[in-house]
Amino acid sequence: MSSTHLLSICDLSINDISHIVTLASKLKIEKFSDTLHGKSVAMLFEKPSLRTKVSFDVGIRQMGGHPIYLGKDEVGLGGREAVSDVARVLSRYVDAIVARVFKHNTLEELAMHASIPVINALSDSEHPCQALGDMLTIEEHIGLSKRPTIAFIGDGNNVASSLALAATALGSKFIIASPIGYELPKTVVEKANSRSSNGQILIHQVSQPQEAITQAEVIYTDVWTSMGQENESTKRNKDFENFQITPQLMDLTKPGSIFMHPLPAHQGQEVSSDMLDDPRSVVFDQAENRLHAQKAIFAHLLERST
Ligand code: NVA
């Protein structure tokens, strides 16, 4: 199960996930290290980014490394140059590739041809760096050992998939409420349930937000329209109109519950305008924890590849 790449949460064993969260807590305190001393990291981005770009750049520098940002017009991944050639060229210069891509198979192709670790910084299928940062946030606010139930309200998208795989690997129940046609991919449900140690079914699909929320300690949502789906936004806004998280909906949750969102948030769509500032919202802790989790991912992958 262990891999030198991180394309999916499934590239990590259950122990790896726990190890990365523990390491991330440690690195949050010990800010600087020389783990990446003398090493360069290429950051290939086909899509826009705030948190991922800045947190990777800052994290690599805090570890003594050198980030090289390559935006979509600079490389022309798969257009100006074949993905396999980009992977082979970058492997001669740098020590790792962080890539944000439209299609997950671009990452698989990079990984197949690279001789250095490839890290998924978001694809259409998964967002493992987000999920690992989220595990750290849940650890800090609730404690992963309590195996809190997670209610994901919205699209069964990249963020939902990685979160479902990470949370269920650590024994949490994951209840997703989505409109018909926007459920989690079957493959994700099967993979998550197959990792459950005692054959327990940990992923539950429901159709009403209230049904999920009343059972959960962690309430999570994401945008209704992900990057690359912009031409579907009118239909999606209509299909998801009853899936907005508001403080009133949060009142149906268990005491001590938290609200999470990977950001950017669209107020008036998946969240009401007062949700991010609600005392139960931990969204800015989540954003910060991306930095610590990604540093832990580097430390973990380097440990593994040496
Ligand atoms: N699901 C969103 C996440 C952004 C962090 C997207 O892919 O655009």
Image: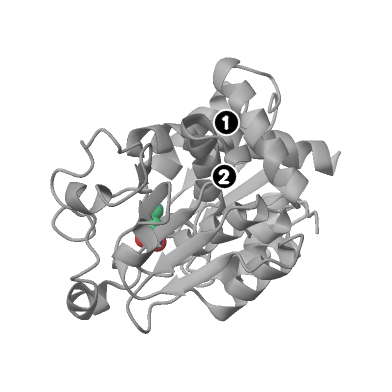
Residue 245 drawn at (x, y percent): 24, 55
Q: Secondary structure at mark 2?
A: helix
Q: Quadrant of residue 60?
A: top right
Callout in the foreground (2, 1) = 2
Q: Classify 10 Å Cα crowding around label 1: few (below 14), some (14-19), many (20 and above).
A: many
If the picture is divided into quarters, which one holds ligand 1? bottom left
- Say whether disc 2 or disc 1 marks the residue closer to the N-terminus: 1
Q: Nearer the viewer, residue 250 or 93?
A: 250
Q: Is residue 32 left or right of residue 242?
A: right
- Mark 2 = which residue? 132
Q: Quadrant of the C terminus?
A: top right
- Mark 1 = which residue? 60
Residue 140 drawn at (x, y percent): 51, 30
Q: Quadrant of residue 241?
A: bottom left
**Residue 7 appears in view:** no
Q: Quadrant of the N terminus?
A: bottom right
Q: Which residue occupies 23% across, 78% down?
A: 239
Distance from mark 1 CB to nearest ligand 1 atom below 8 Å: no
Q: How is the model colour-coded?
A: one colour
Circles 2, 1 touching at the beta carbon (< 8 Å): no
Residue 36 drawn at (x, y percent): 68, 28
Q: Classify 10 Å Cα crowding around label 2: few (below 14), some (14-19), many (20 and above).
A: many
